[in-house]
Image: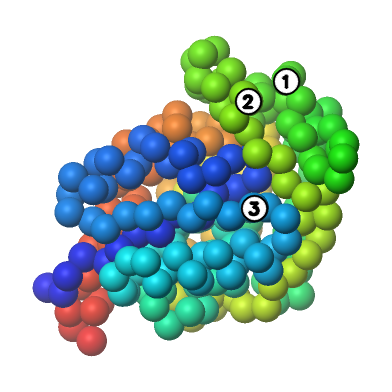
């Protein structure tokens, strides 16, 4: 069997790479080379460009793992030849003609976007009360940490589009968060079906990687093993 692929994490809005803190140490202990992208949520193109640069800091081939808006990022960045698989966690996965906002507009507005966001100074901030819609199955202490460290995106970020639809040509795995009040679970299911992805449903809030890390790790390991086997027989 070929060497293990590297694993590159891509965060969503109201987050940075530390949102994968419960996944990175176990994967490193498994012998995977792991890195989390840190992008600015200023423009979609800049975020994708950061992922492309980050791919150069780890060994190829790589699996991209995207949470939430990070799914839109890996959909574009995953067309890079160094990427051999995609894992979506409660994520968006727009098609060529869709923006992240356009994809969400096809489904009922979720609680957080109905009453948990405040736009100020050109950024979209999560309100203190909005944390329950984002991470409601975490402990109170963890919720407060997530809110205190949340990273607000440019208010126009979801209306931007970067070319490229990697899930059309790369194998994909999707985790649907069944209690998600940030990205609608039916959107996650639709996106996964359209991709032809291997799909798992996890009883969690939007932040499945924090509330159900073992289940998310199982999916990432399954994806990595599948990619290794495919590369070994190619």
Front residue of this view, candidates 191 and 123 = 123
Q: Quadrant of the C terminus?
A: bottom left
Q: Which residue is at 27% across, 53% downward?
A: 221
Q: Which residue is at 54% across, 13% downward?
A: 140
Against 33, residue 208 (above or below) is above
Mark identifier at residue 34: none
Q: Which residue is at 37% across, 55% downward?
A: 35
Q: Position of residue 3 (x, y in %)?
A: 17, 70
Give the labeled residue for mark 1: 128
* Helix, strand or loop under label 1: helix
Q: Position of residue 153 (x, y in %)?
A: 73, 46
Q: What is the image's colouring?
A: rainbow
Front residue of this view, candidates 97 and 9 = 9
Callout 3 environment at 10 Å: few (<14), some (14 to 19), or many (20+)?
Answer: some
Answer whether labels 1 and 2 touch (C-beta < 8 Å): yes
Give the labeled residue for mark 3: 40
Residue 171 is drawn in which quadrant? Answer: bottom left
Q: Which residue is at 45% across, 32% downward?
A: 210
Callout 1 environment at 10 Å: few (<14), some (14 to 19), or many (20+)?
Answer: few
Q: Quadrant of the N terminus?
A: bottom left
* Helix, strand or loop under label 2: helix
Against 75, residue 123 (above or below) is above
Give the labeled residue for mark 2: 147
In this view, the mark in front (2 or 3): 3
Q: Position of residue 125 (x, y in %)?
A: 77, 35
Answer whether labels 1 and 3 touch (C-beta < 8 Å): no
* Helix, strand or loop under label 3: loop
Disc 1 and disc 2: Cα gap in Å?
A: 7 Å
Disc 2 and disc 3: Cα gap in Å?
A: 17 Å
């Amino acid at each position: 069997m070929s060497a293990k692929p590297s694993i590159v994490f891509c965060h969503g809005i109201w987050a940075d790479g530390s949102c994968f803190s419960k996944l990175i140490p176990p994967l490193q202990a498994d012998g995977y080379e792991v890195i989390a992208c840190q992008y600015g949520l200023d423009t979609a193109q800049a975020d994708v460009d950061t992922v492309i640069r980050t791919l150069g800091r780890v060994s190829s081939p790589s699996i991209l793992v995207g949470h939430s808006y990070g799914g839109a990022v890996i959909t574009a960045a995953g067309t890079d030849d160094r990427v051999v698989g995609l894992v979506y966690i409660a994520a968006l996965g727009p098609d060529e003609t869709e923006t992240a906002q356009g994809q969400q507009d096809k489904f009922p507005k979720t609680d957080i976007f109905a009453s948990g966001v405040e736009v100020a100074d050109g950024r979209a901030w999560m309100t203190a009360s909005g944390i329950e819609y984002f991470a409601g199955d975490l402990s109170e202490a963890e919720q407060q940490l997530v809110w205190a460290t949340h990273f607000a995106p440019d208010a126009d970020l979801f209306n931007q589009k970067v070319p490229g639809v990697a899930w059309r040509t790369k194998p994909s795995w999707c985790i649907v968060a069944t209690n998600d009040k940030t990205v609608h679970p039916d959107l996650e299911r639709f996106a996964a079906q359209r991709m032809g992805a291997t799909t798992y449903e996890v009883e969690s809030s939007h932040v499945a990687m924090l509330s159900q890390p073992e289940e998310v790790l199982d999916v990432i390991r399954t994806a990595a093993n599948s990619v290794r086997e495919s590369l070994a027989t190619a």
